[in-house]
Image: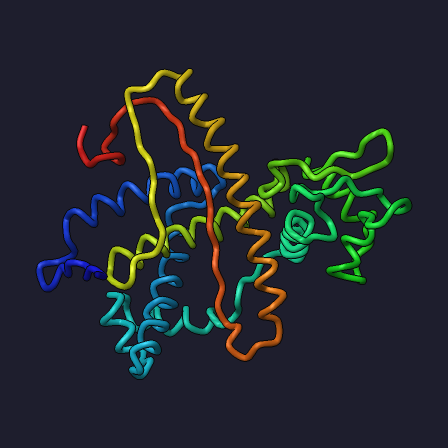
Amino acid sequence: MARKAKSGGLGGPPATFLKALERLLGPLVRAAMSLGVTFPLFIRLLKRIYIQVATAESRAAGAAVTVSRISVMTGLQRKDIGQIKEQIERKLGPPANVSLGARLIGIWSGAKTFTDAAGRPLALPRFAGPRPTFEDLVRSVSSDVRPRAVLDEWLRLGVVDVDAQDRVHLKGDAFVPRQGFDELAYFYGRNLRDHIAASTHNLIGGDPLLERAVYYDKLTSRSVDALERMARDIGVEALVRINREALRLAEGDEGKADADQRMSVGIYFYRGPDIVTESDDGEK
């Protein structure tokens, strides 16, 4: 049965949620500070998000979206809302190179044409040789992009290798590029957003979504190394299997009137010193 979140009511938000929020914001503020996002800029961004969410919630409830209503929901001043609303209408999609790359890797990892009998991505001749080739892969998604340009960029990012037979190999950890800040920043926002959205859904009510984690402390570095290797192996295998099935279903759903849903599933592993801080548990 779905649980309903405890409301703070007139007494304010629950103290336990405020502690959770403080813990959650710590890594985000660390990233923001390291990349030059100052507190005033962060607040400006936060105001935009409050207005966006309040607008979406009002529309979902069938209520009129007015400045007064948004002001009551968010606590923002009416003048701030009027100024910010004028800037919100644009949608922020992924950079074109990120969207193309994710699609290509998904096909290479899941489509039968580009995988072997065991479901592993084939080594693809660059531009000539037995079919399919790397050029065939790129052309399967876009005829407007030069396969050589994609290959050069992926070599720079460490997504692929080229062997002595001039065949292109997809690296096992290619789901997230090692370099390329635009790519990393986009997936940082998208993956964390969906993870937090799943947790928020479970917290405030609704049929529970899958969102689980395993946590242990008091471990040696050697033990954590072993667990990290295990998590990587199992995690990549799970993502490859899900990608293959998602690709099959997406091909079957193409063109259907009710094909208006999306999904994401992710794997993460964190390691750090066994030290409790205020941002971890709200107490030293």
Colour theme: rainbow
Quarter of the image with the C terminus in it = top left
Q: Residue furthest left?
A: 11
- Looking at the image, is 62 positioned above or below residue 34? below
Q: Which of 278 and 160 is in front in this view?
A: 160
Q: Nearer the viewer, residue 79 or 15?
A: 15
Quarter of the image with the N terminus in it = bottom left
Report if residue 221 is visible in the image: yes
Q: Which of 67 and 203 is in front in this view?
A: 203
Q: Which residue lies furthest to the right in this view?
A: 128
Q: How far from the left and from the top, in percent, is residue 40? A: 38, 51
Count of marks overlaid on the render: 0
- Looking at the image, is 168 positioned above or below residue 43? above
Q: How far from the left and from the top, in percent, is residue 60? A: 34, 76
**Residue 18 shown left or right of residue 259 in the figure:** left
Report if residue 97 is visible in the image: no
**Residue 151 shown left or right of residue 176 in the figure:** right
**Residue 161 shown left or right of residue 254 in the figure:** right
Q: How far from the left and from the top, in percent, is residue 277? A: 25, 29
Question: Which residue occupies 32% across, 72% down?
Answer: 57
- Looking at the image, is 173 positioned above or below residue 261? above
Quarter-wise, where is residue 58 in the image? bottom left
Q: How far from the left and from the top, in percent, is residue 108? A: 69, 49
Question: Which residue occupies 67% across, 36% down?
Answer: 171
Quarter-wise, where is residue 126 in the image? top right
Question: Which residue occupies 85% across, 49% down?
Answer: 131
